[in-house]
Image (tube, rainbow, N blue to C red):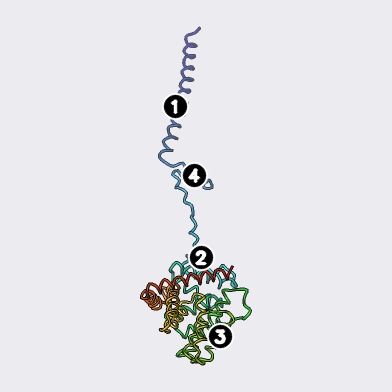
C-alpha cells in the first residue's frame, strides 16, 4: 500500500470523528441553553396568547359562603319577614310572632308586630292591643285608645260565634270593658257615663256567657244600688256565681259581706273562708292590695276560725269535683 493512501485514510477518519464530536457538543449546548432559559424567563413568556396555562403558585380556593338565613322572629325589620307570606295570612302570622316576642321580652319588636296585626283587622291582636292601652303595659296608658279598640272588637261580636272560643271570649270581654267605661265615661271622647248601658252590658255577659267579671260587677251594683235598685240578696247571688269560678275580687267582697254580720260566728267563718280563697286566687302582680288584705284577715282570725274555714274549702272542692264527674 502506498504511504499516500494510508495518510488519506487516517485524515478521513479523523474528520468524521471531529464532526461527530462537534454534533454531540452542539446538542449538549442546546440542552444547557434550554435549561438556563427556563430558569431565567418563565415558560409562559413563550406560550401562545390563546393558551391558558396553570398558575405556578395557585391561590387557595375561596368558597362563597351564603349569608345565614334568619328565622322569622330574628329579622332586623319585624315586618320585612311578612313580605314572603300571602297577604291573607300576614296578620295572623304577625300576631303569633308578636306573642313569641313578648315571651322573650322583646317589647319593641312585639309592639310593631301586634300593632300591624291589629290594624290589619286580626281580632285577637286588636283585643290584646286594647288591653295594653287600658292597663298601660308596654305602652303609655290611654283610656281613649283602649276604648277605640274595645269598640272595634265588640263590633265583631256574634252571639253564635262558638266555633272559635278565643275570639268569642275576646268579644265578650270587650263588651265588659265597655260596660266598665260606661260607669265613669272616658274624658276626651263622646263615651259619657251611662249606668243603664253599663248594667245592661254586664247582664248580657253575665247571664248569656257566665262571664265572672261581669257577674262580679253586677253584684257590686246591686249591693251599692248603683244605677239600679239596691238589693243585697241579689248582689250576693251574683258574687257567689263569680266566686265559684275563682274570681278573686268577688271572693274578697263576698267575704266582706259575711264579715259584716258581726253577731254571727258562722258568717264570720264564711267570711274568713272566702278571703282565704281570694288570697289563693289573687294575681300577685295586679291585685297586690287585695292579696295583702285577704292574707291579713286570715292571719288575724282565731285558730278555730282558720281550721273551720280550711275544712269548708276542702268540702267545697270535693263537692265541685263530684258534680263534674
How far apart marks 2 and 3 lie (CA) works out to 43 Å
* Tags 2 and 3 touching, CB below 8 Å: no
Q: Quadrant of residue 307?
A: bottom left
Instruction: Indicate whether 32 appears above or below 82.
Output: above
Looking at the image, tell me whether mark 4 or mark 3 is earlier in sequence order.
4
Q: Quadrant of residue 281?
A: bottom left
Identity of the residue drawn at 39% across and 73% down: 304
- Percent position of residue 213, x then y: 50, 80
How far apart marks 2 and 1 lie (CA) works out to 80 Å
Instruction: Indicate whether 4 appears above or below 239.
Output: above
* Tags 4 and 1 touching, CB below 8 Å: no
Identity of the residue drawn at 49% across and 67% down: 100
How far apart marks 1 and 3 lie (CA) works out to 123 Å
Q: Residues within 10 Å of mark 4 (few under 14, many from 20)?
A: few
Residue under numbered circle 3: 203
- Identify the residue at the far top of this view: 1
Q: Residues within 10 Å of mark 3 (few under 14, many from 20)?
A: many
* Tags 4 and 3 touching, CB below 8 Å: no
Residue under numbered circle 1: 25
**Which residue is at the front of the view, 134 or 41?**
134
Circle nearer the viewer, 1 or 3: 3
**Image disc number at residue 72:** 2
Q: Quadrant of the C terminus?
A: bottom right
- Percent position of residue 227, x then y: 50, 92
User: Is residue 149 visible in this depiction of the protein?
Assistant: no
For label 3, the SS is: helix
- Percent position of residue 276, x then y: 43, 74
Circle nearer the viewer, 4 or 1: 4
Looking at the image, tell me whether mark 4 or mark 1 is earlier in sequence order.
1
Residue under numbered circle 4: 54
Amino acid at each position: 500500500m502506498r504511504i499516500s493512501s494510508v495518510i488519506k485514510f487516517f485524515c478521513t477518519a479523523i474528520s468524521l470523528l471531529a464532526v461527530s464530536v462537534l454534533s454531540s457538543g452542539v446538542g449538549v449546548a442546546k440542552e444547557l441553553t434550554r435549561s438556563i432559559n427556563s430558569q431565567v424567563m418563565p415558560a409562559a413568556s413563550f406560550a401562545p396568547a390563546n393558551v391558558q396555562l396553570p398558575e405556578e403558585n395557585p391561590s387557595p380556593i375561596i368558597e362563597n359562603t351564603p349569608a345565614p338565613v334568619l328565622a322569622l322572629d330574628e329579622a332586623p325589620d319585624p315586618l320585612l319577614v311578612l313580605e314572603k307570606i300571602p297577604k291573607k295570612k300576614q296578620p295572623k302570622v304577625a300576631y303569633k310572632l308578636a306573642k313569641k316576642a313578648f315571651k322573650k321580652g322583646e317589647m319593641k319588636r312585639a309592639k310593631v308586630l301586634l300593632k300591624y296585626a291589629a290594624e290589619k283587622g286580626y281580632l285577637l291582636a286588636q283585643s290584646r292591643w286594647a288591653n295594653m292601652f287600658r292597663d298601660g303595659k308596654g305602652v303609655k296608658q290611654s283610656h281613649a285608645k283602649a276604648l277605640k279598640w274595645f269598640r272595634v272588637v265588640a263590633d265583631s261580636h256574634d252571639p253564635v260565634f262558638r266555633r272559635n272560643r278565643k275570639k268569642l271570649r275576646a268579644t265578650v270581654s270587650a263588651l265588659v270593658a265597655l260596660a266598665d267605661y260606661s260607669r265613669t265615661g272616658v274624658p276626651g271622647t263622646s263615651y259619657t257615663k251611662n249606668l243603664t248601658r253599663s248594667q245592661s252590658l254586664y247582664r248580657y255577659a253575665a247571664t248569656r256567657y257566665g262571664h265572672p267579671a261581669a257577674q262580679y260587677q253586677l253584684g257590686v251594683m246591686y249591693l251599692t244600688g248603683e244605677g239600679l235598685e239596691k238589693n243585697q240578696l241579689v248582689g250576693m247571688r251574683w258574687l257567689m256565681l263569680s266566686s265559684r269560678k275563682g274570681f278573686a275580687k268577688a271572693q274578697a267582697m263576698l267575704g266582706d259581706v259575711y264579715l259584716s254580720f258581726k253577731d254571727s260566728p258562722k258568717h264570720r267563718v264564711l267570711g274568713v273562708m272566702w278571703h282565704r280563697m281570694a288570697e289563693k286566687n289573687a294575681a300577685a302582680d295586679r291585685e297586690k292590695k287585695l292579696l295583702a288584705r285577704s292574707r291579713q284577715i286570715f292571719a288575724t282570725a282565731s285558730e278555730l276560725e282558720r281550721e273551720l274555714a280550711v275544712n269548708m274549702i276542702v268540702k267545697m272542692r270535693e263537692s265541685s269535683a263530684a258534680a263534674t264527674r
